[in-house]
Image (tube, grey):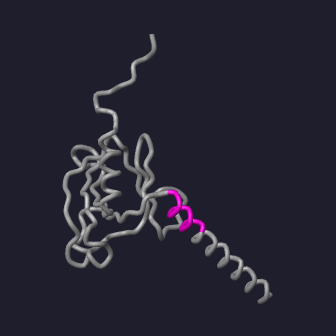
Amino acid sequence: MWVWMIVAVVIAVVLIAAGVMYRLVEVRRAGTPVLLRPLPAEADQGWRHGSVHYGDEGLAYYRLSSLRPGPTVSMSRRRIEIVGRRAPAGTELEIMDPDFGIVELTIGRTGKGGRYELGMSPEVATAFQSWIEARAPRRARRRPAA
């Protein structure tokens, strides 16, 4: 009886470890590394490592240390608004390089979709800004074919 319980626990631990390793490999392989935190937050609290995956319609953020199968946060490309930029300060410099930039975002014009900060390297910040600027204008709508 005890042997079967031990075997079950060992199998469960192996499966959980395999899931964690799969998530780590997939998130790191397929995305762009960033740090994200929801706002409001204390001065140096709430930062989470992960990666963003850009798509035509939106951005998906995958937290590095999560077992969740899908994205942790999804943002519609049309609704992302950059409202500020700053350099890391204080204890943020312990987890970010000094040349990193922090971009403050709101989702929707009023921010009702959420507020976030993304910490990223200068190269990633340039790519993010280009991706935002390349979106279709708000007034653009598809017209039905005649």
Give the quadrant of the N terminus. bottom right
Query: 123 left or right of 32?
Result: left
Query: Which quadrant of the view contains residue 37?
Result: bottom left
x and y percentages locating residue 126 in the rendered image: 31, 53
Question: Is residue 112 shown above or below 90?
Answer: above
Question: Is residue 7 shown above or below 41?
Answer: below
Q: Main secondary structure of the magenta part?
A: helix
Q: Which residue: 40% across, 45% down? A: 58
Query: 125 left or right of 142?
Result: left
Residue stretch rendered in magenta on the structure? 22-30
Query: Which quadrant of the view contains residue 11?
Result: bottom right
x and y percentages locating residue 146 in the rendered image: 45, 10
Q: Which is more toward the observer, 57 or 85? A: 85
- Identify the residue at the far top of this view: 146
Q: Which residue: 29% across, 58% down? A: 116
Q: Which residue: 31% across, 72% down? A: 96
Does the magenta run of residues contain 67?
A: no
Question: Is residue 103 shown above or below 64?
Answer: above
Q: Which is more toward the observer, 66 or 133? A: 133
Does the magenta run of residues contain 23?
A: yes
Query: 7 left or right of 17?
Result: right
Number of dots carrying numbers = 0
Query: 6 left or right of 37?
Result: right
